[in-house]
Image (cartoon, coloured by chain):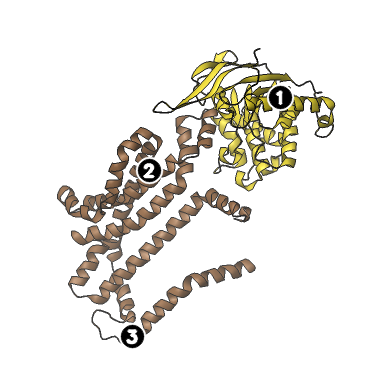
Amino acid sequence: MLDVRGLRKVYGGEGGRSVEALRDLTFTLQEGELACLVGPSGCGKTTLLKCVSGLLAPTAGEVRLAGEPVHEPPEGMAMVFQEYGRSLFPWMTNAQNVELPLKERNVPKEERRLLVAETLASVGLEDVSSAYPWQLSGGMQQRVAIARAVAYQPKVLLMDEPFAAVDAQTRADLEDLLRGLWQRLGVTILFVTHDIDEAVYLGGRVIVLTNAPTVVQDDVAVDLPDERDQVSTRALPLFTELRSRIYEEIQRAKSGDGRVYSP
Amino acid sequence: MTRMLSLLRQVFVVLALPVVLLAVWWVTSAGSENFYLPPLSEILTTFGEVWFSGRIVSDVLPSLLRLAAGYTLAALVGVGLGIAVGSSKALRETVEPVLEFGRAIPPPVLVPVLMLIAGHGNSMKILVILSGCIWPILLNTVEGVRAVDEVLVDTGRTFRMRARSRLHHLVLPAASPQIFAGLRQALSLGIILMVISEMFAASSGLGFTIVQFQRGFAIPEMWSGIILLGIIGFGLSLLFRLVESRALRWYEGIRLAERGGSPSKT
C-alpha cells in the first residue's frame, strides 16, 4: 500500500553547509497495517513524514502510494498533525472543519452532511459540531482533527506525534479511540511517536529509526493480542519485553553503534 | 436585570467624560467676548441652521461619497496586491523597499501633484484618498498573508485545497486580523485626506465649506463644521468597529480563550 524506497533528504544550506536529515530509508506498509515509527528525538521523524506525504520533495528515493509515485499530497492520504490548535481552521465550526476537505473533493451535499455527523459521532463529539475548535479542550480538538482525516476516507493516514501535546489520561483515551477506528475502518496508518510505550501499545509493528542522518535500525513485529486494554495489555510480559527491546535499540541508535537493519 | 444594569453602567462610563467636557466648554465659553472663541451655545444654534438647510446634500454627502470611493478602491487594490506580494517571497523581496518608500511619503504632498494630473474634480480627491489609504492596507495585508501559520498551510495542501478555496477559506481569514488593522488605520487617514483635498481646490465638501467660513470670518459656522467632522469621524469608527467585531468574532474568541475567560459567553 505504502512503499518507501531509498528515501534521502539533505537540506541544502547555501555556502556549502548542508544537513543530511534522512540517509536511506526503506520500508513497506501492507494494506490495513498500523505501523509506528519511533526514534530518538531529532531523528528526522517529521522530515520523513513530510516526504512521505508529498509536502516535501526528497533528495533521492521515492514514495509510492498504491503503486503511484507521490510528488505532491495525493488524494488517498490524510495527515493529522501534532499541533491540533494550528491545524484546525479557527474561523470554522468543528463541523465545517470536517466538511471542508469533502467539499474540495466535490462530495455531494447530502453525503457530506451524513459523513460529518457520522465521523464526529465516531469520535464522541456529536454535541459540539456547531462549536468552534478553540472552545474545546486540546484532546477534543485533536479528536476533531482525527474526525476530519477519517471523513476524508484516506487509504493511508499519517499521524505526526498526534498525542504528544495532551495530558496522560486524554492520551490513553485517544490511543484507544484510534485503535477502535483502525479496527473498524481497516485504514492503513503510519503513526510517528517518540514514546516507546505508545508505539508498542498501538502498533502491529514498530519501525525503529536511528539518529540523523536517519536509517531504519530495526523493524519489530508486535504480536500482542488484537484486543488491547490500557491496564492488562501493558502488564503482559510480552509488552514489557518488546518495550525493553525497543528501548535498548534506541539507546544504541543514540550512541550511533547500532547495526543497520536490512529487510 | 444585572445585564441591563451593566449595560447602563457601560453607557454611563462611555458618556461621562464627553458630557463633562461639553459642560466645561459650555460654562467657560458662556458670555465669551472673544471673536474667535464664541460661546458654545451660539455654535450649537448655528449648527442646526448651517447644516440642516441643504448643506447635508450639497457638502456633506459629496465628501462622504469621495471618501467611500477612495477608501473602497484602496481596500480592493491594497488587499489584492497585498495577497499577491505576501504569497510570493521573490515578489516581496523585489517590491518591499519600494513599498516602504511609498508609505514614507506624507500623502498630502501628493495633492498638488495630483491636481496637475487629475484636475480639480472628484477624481483628484478620490485619488488623494486612495494614494494615502492604500499603504497601511497593503503593508498589513502583506504581513498578514506572509505570517499564515505553516501548519495551516500544510493542512490545506494535504487536503488538496484548490487555489480559490485556499484564498477564501485559508489565506484571507487567516490574514483578516491584520487586514482589519490596516483598514482601521486607513479609515482615519482617509477622513483627514478627504478634508485636506477639499481645502486645496473644491467647490463643495466639508473641507471646502469650513475654509470658506474661516475666510469669511463666520467663526461660529466654522466651529460647527469642525464639530460635525468630529461626529462623522466618531460615527465611522463606531461603524467600523461593529463590522470588525462581527468579522473577527473567532479571533476575539481565541484571545478570550487564551486568557482563560469563557468564550462561549459571547
What is the three-letter code of the residue carrying label 2?
Val
Three-letter residue code for mark 1: Leu
Cα–Cα span, label 3 and label 2: 49 Å
Q: Which residue is mark 1?
A: A185
Q: Quadrant of the N terminus of chain B?
A: bottom right
Given residues B133 and B158, the one toward you in this image is B158
Amino acid type, label 3: Ala
* Badge 1: chain ID: A
Q: Nearer the viewer, residue B17 or B100?
A: B100
Q: Could you say whether the residue bearing mark 1 is in a helix, strand or loop?
A: helix
Dot 3, how many residues are within 10 Å of its Cα: few (below 14), some (14-19), or many (20+)? some
Quadrant of the drawing holding the C terminus of chain B: bottom right
* Residues at marks 3 and 2 touching, judged by CB atoms closer than 8 Å: no
Q: Quick check: A262 left or right of B187?
A: right
What chain is tagged by disc 3?
Answer: B
- Residue of label 3: B30
Q: Earlier in the sequence, mark 3 or mark 2?
A: 3
In the rendered image of the structure, the colour used to display chain A is yellow
In front of the other: A262 or A30: A262
Quarter of the figure with residue B225: bottom left
Chain on which label 2 sits: B
Q: Which of the two marks, 3 or 2, is nearer to us in this view?
A: 2
Residue at x-position 56% and y-position 43%: A90
Where disc 2 sits, the SS reads helix
* Mark 2 Cα-neighbour bin, 10 Å: few <14, some 14–19, many ≥20: many
Can you give x and y, in whole percent of width and height, for residue A207 in the image? 67, 22
What residue sits right under mark 2 in the picture?
Answer: B79
**Measured Cα–Cα span from mark 2 to mark 1:** 44 Å
Q: Position of residue A258 (x, y in %)?
A: 65, 21
In this orientation, does residue A32 appear? Answer: no
Write down the colour of chain B: brown
